[in-house]
Structure formats: structure tokens, C-alpha cells
Image: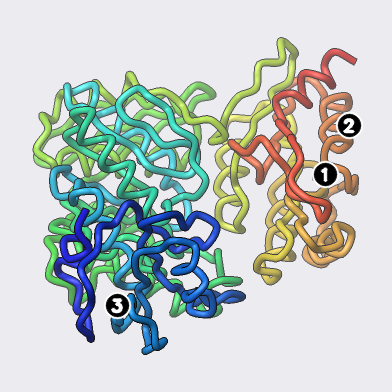
Amino acid sequence: MKLSEILKGISVKNEYREAEISDVTEDSRFVKEGSLFICIKGASFDGHSVAEEMLGKGAAAVVCERDLGLDNQIIVESTRTALSPICANFFGNPADKLKLIGLTGTNGKTTTTFLIKQILENCGRKTGLIGTVQNMIGDEILPAHYTTPAPYELQSLFRKMVDAGCEYCVMEVSSQALAQGRVNGMHFLVGAFTNLTQDHLDYHKTWENYFEAKRILFKNCDTAVTNVDDEYGLKIVDGLECKVRTYAVKNINSDYTARNVTFAPDGVKYELVSENIGRVDCPIPGRFSVYNSLCAASVALELGLDFKDVVIAISKSNGVKGRIEVVPTDTDFTVIIDYAHSPDGLENIILSLKEIARGRVVTLFGCGGDRDKTKRPKMGKIASQLSDFCIVTSDNPRSENPSKIIEDVLEGMKDTKTPYKVIENRKEAIMWAVKNAKKDDIVLLAGKGHETYQILNSGKIHFDEREVVAEALKS
């Protein structure tokens, strides 16, 4: 592809020489003959420092933010801002041929995107999905490395979806992706907001930065579907030009409301009230399943799908790996795996399990290393106040000392009387939890969810909690 075609719509500050481009990358490891190298300044590495070296490796040109004195340089105001539209141009702007639906919020994004995809496909619309657990092109499953991929991978996925005949793409849009401009230049038919609680402050530093990052999505959508039971539900769209539609369980004046909610071990039921009324039977247990399915239904209805078809589609939906996932045990107790790794996420899952539990709720959890330390005592306090028994262990300690992370968690548990046990090794902790479970207990393994690995200071290792549970049951 010609360099001028890739730079279409990009404000370039200098004259440049036309070239044939074979690939686009901001990663110096992937530069090859004919590549266009984008110089991105990160937290620990500045691509500008290797620009000349990349030309020596065969790059046809480099995109930079300042004059580097190179013949093959293209100077722009912000390379990070330019990266997404450059990648879009390289792949032929495939997102323009898709109806994009973006979800943002602290909790509920993954389950809700899966529900929206299932609703659309039950209604005959082929749909792609991009998210934390996996990426999907119709029924084809592709691995996911990030909640929202970097621009090159993202545009590549869009291209594959278009080529496969997808009409829609529903995607999780993380706060980091919005702040880093990974979706710059993209326009969403519908943007949806689930909720906002503390998370990712290790990256955003302040709550205001986190909030403003989430808001970016709604500056680039036609219709915003937002949860007005959350205190930020209306603030997130305040002053924006998009059409606003609301959903809620408590706020009866919303556009879409769930009423007469009932909970059972195998799901939730409620009346979906809008211009029509229908009985929803969602086969995913938990209070937050009401919000997730209500959000999904609201989005689908805003897309113009038939009300009756939407209600029927929700009843046919499946669960999501690592989201209130029931592990087969063939015992008189239940083991559930859930990704809850924030204070609010942990509170929601435990409260939901308490509503359906016949015995104890035993919560096994930890906190990630090299991440927001302020949420550790908060999660300890929530787990100990709401659970009947706690097992404090490691999550992904990364470079931190696991015992120090656990000490931070225990600070939040010192004023509660709930019994707990500390087992630093997560495998040993799960083995102990399974072996000591009592009749009618619900053993919650919180924090890892869909992940099949653990990140230690020695590196990443294979770690699938389902396999550990099976091993514990065998022994």
C-alpha cells in the first residue's frame, strides 16, 4: 500500500517521500523490509530513540513527533493519536463497514458483551466480539491478550469480521484503551455504560482521570445506553451530544426497567418494562445478572430488534467462562469461579451468592501485585464482612512479595470476627478449600476467572483453577 494512502486524514507537518508500505508497527521487534514504524513514547521506552535503527532494519519510513533529522520521517502532532487511524487505513477502514457497539464500565462488560452477541445472533445477525476472555468472529474463537487490543490487532480483527460477513461487532472498551487512543477515529452506533467503581488507579492515578477516560466512548457514539442506578450513570453522558437512553432496577423512571425480580440458583427472572412488558428468564444467577441482561436487552432494543425476540434470546443465552462459572464437582457443595478482582466486583458476587446459598459462602481471594494497593484492605474488609469464611491467598503477585500483599489485605480484616485462613500458595489454598468444604457450602474462587495462568516474580506459569479443583476432588 502507498504511504500516502496510509496517511490519509492524518495531519502531517512536513513533506515526505512516497513509499510502498508492507506493514505497520510500533514494536521495534517486528520491523521488516517496507514497514512503517510508529515512534511511540511509553512509560519506559521511547520509540524515537530507535527510529534511525529501524530504518537500517528496512523500515520504509518512520512516524515521529519531532524532527529527528531523518530523510524518511513523517512528523505528526501525536504518534499515539495517529496510530489508530493509520492502522485503520492500512486495513481498508473495516470498522466503517461494521455496526459497532462498545461497552465500558468497571464491572459487567464481559458478560454483557456476550449476552448482546448471543441476542443478535439468535435474531439472525452475524456478530463479532472483542473482549477480555476471547475474540470471536461469528463462531470462530480467537485468543484475547488484552480487553481492548492495540490498534493494529484491533483493525486486523475488524478486517477479518468484515471478510467473514459480520454485520455487527460488540466490544469491551477499557479505560486504558480509551486513554491511549486505541479506538481513535472509530464511531460507535451504541455505547453502553455498566457502572463505575475503583479500579485501575495504578494506571490512571486519579479517579478523575479514570472517569474522563470512560467518558471518551460517549463522545464518539450515536446512542448512549446507561445505568442510572449507578451514581455516574448520567454524569458519564452529561453535556454530550449523543442520544441518551437509560436502564435501571431501582429507578422506575428509566427507559428500560427490571421489575418484580426473583432469584434462584439457576438464574434470575424479572419483568422487562419499556414501551412493552415481557417476562425475562436469564439462566445466569446473581443480582448483577439482572443488570447485565437488562443492559444487553436495552442495547438490542435500541438497535431496533423486536421486543419479543430479545426476551426469547436472553432465555437461550449461555454463561461466560470465569463469570459466576459453576465448576462440576458431583458433590454436596458448589464451587464457583469468578473474575471479581475489585472491591465492588467482590461485593457484588458475594452478595449474589448469599441470596441463593443454603450453607456457608466461603470466599477464597487475593489481590494482584504491581497494581492499585489501596483496594487491598477494602477487598479484605468486604470479603470478611460478607462471607462466612475467608481464605486469603495470592492472585497474580507479579514482582511483589506475595506475603506483603496479603498483609495489606489483612489490614482490612482485623476489625471483623469472620474466621479466615491464610494460605499463600494459591494451589494449596484451593486444595484446602475443596477438602474442607461442607454440605451446601458455596466455595467462591475469586479473582482469576477465565485466566489459565498465574504471574509470579519468576514469570508466567500455567494455572487453571478448574484443573486444581479436579485434582483436589481426586485426592
Residue placed under numbered mark 1 in the picture: 391
**Amino acid tagged 1:** Ile
Mark with earlier residue (1, 3): 3
In the picture of the structure, the residue carrying the numbered disc 2 is: 432
Q: Secondary structure at mark 1?
A: strand
Q: Could one spot residue 22 in this view of the protein?
A: yes
Q: Could you give the CA–CA distance between mark 1 and mark 3, rounded to whole angstroms? A: 55 Å
Q: Residue at x 49, y 25 (%)?
A: 264
Q: Residue at x 41, y 59 (%)?
A: 25
> Element at badge 3?
strand
Q: Where is residue 145 shown, x and y percent of the image?
A: 52, 45
Q: In the image, which is nearer the foreground, mark 2 or mark 3?
A: 3
Numbered label attached to residue 254? none
Q: From this viewpoint, is residue 253 visible?
A: no
Foreground: 247 or 449? 449
Give residue 339's position: percent from left, percent from top.
59, 43
Q: CA distance from mark 2 to mark 3?
A: 59 Å
Residue type at numbered disc 3: Ile
| First of labels 2, 3 by sequence position | 3
